[in-house]
Image: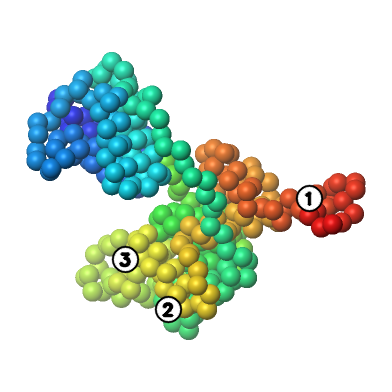
Amino acid sequence: MDRTLSGWIERYLDYLRFERNASSNTVRNYDSDLRQFFHYLTHTPEGQERPEPGLEQVDNLTIREFLGTLYQKKNKKSSIARKLASVRSFMKFLSLEAAIETNPARNVVSPKQESRLPDCLAIDLVGSLVESPDTGTDLGKRDRAILEMLYAAGIRVGELVGLNLGDISLEEGLVRVLGKGSKERIVPFGERARETLQDYLNVRGGIVRFRGKQQSGRRHSGEEAVFVNVRGGRLTARSVWNIVDRHVGCMAERLKVHPHTLRHSYATHMLNAGADLRTIQELLGHESLSTTQKYTHVSVEQLIRVYQSCHPRAGRKPGRP
């Protein structure tokens, strides 16, 4: 067994993949963070290589110095916090495996995060964005269905591109989603999303069959995918980002929008309309309610409405003399 630092990193990534069943995106992030930490340990500030340290040589001070270099390189606090979390989790794994006595990263303080509210679009702007694709074309029908599903079901972009044909029930208006940690949940979607999905699925088959002929009948990545590219392959998350960017660019308003903005808008609009946090937590697939609670900070409309309807002396709108 390879008991070097690099060998343990490989074992830890395999542990995430096969025992923790972590998502590919999670594994990729841990891989990137730990490779960066390993590069710091095996190279001088001038970029010259130096011997790989033993596990016992990686202590609290080493990790603090690593974070210091990240600050010097102007990394965002959120990025530094994530990298520290990756190193801390890796060191915890080493401790549990008895490769080291204690976790040297346990008491390293994570940088204080700046308070940041989720991006959210007004309802009318969501409507303008979702209805922007030209549904007179096959790709326009696809893009409209993508935008509708991101907002109508509040799913993550990774969950969207992972959808297979068997995951959607148009009759019931339900979609089966494989979320983080391969946790499955059922999410409803509305009539408009159902109609746009049906319009898209009517033309999707022709795209896939065309590519199948070009590939001499071989199976390909898009055969079961709901959302496919022009060659019939499964769309990637990056492709969806590009699709959203393209349609945002066609709008009159200058907006900073990404696929997750539609998910944030979905949650905020549901909360403003009276949905409770527990329900939104289930719909979004959040493991912790605290993750969902961030949406309460942007739901002033709901607070005002509840106050006016419930307080016995709410004879005028709050904030007015």
Q: Residue furthest bottom?
A: 136
Q: Secondary structure at mark 3?
A: loop
Q: Position of residue 245 (x, y in %)?
A: 42, 69
Name the disc covering residue 233, or none: 3
Q: Residue at x 90, y 48 (%)?
A: 313
**Mark 1 / mark 3, whichever is N-terminal:** 3
Q: Position of residue 5 (x, y in %)?
A: 18, 29
Q: Report if residue 142 is visible in the image.
A: no
Name the one closer to the observer, 205 or 312.
312
- For marks 1 and 3, give the CA distance: 48 Å
**Mark 2 / mark 1, whichever is N-terminal:** 2
Q: Nearer the viewer, mark 2 or mark 1?
A: 1
Instruction: Name above or below for residue 39 compared with residue 272.
Output: above
Name the disc covering residue 138, or none: 2
Name the one closer to the observer, 119 or 129.
119
Choose top left, top right, bottom left or bottom right for residue 151. Answer: bottom right
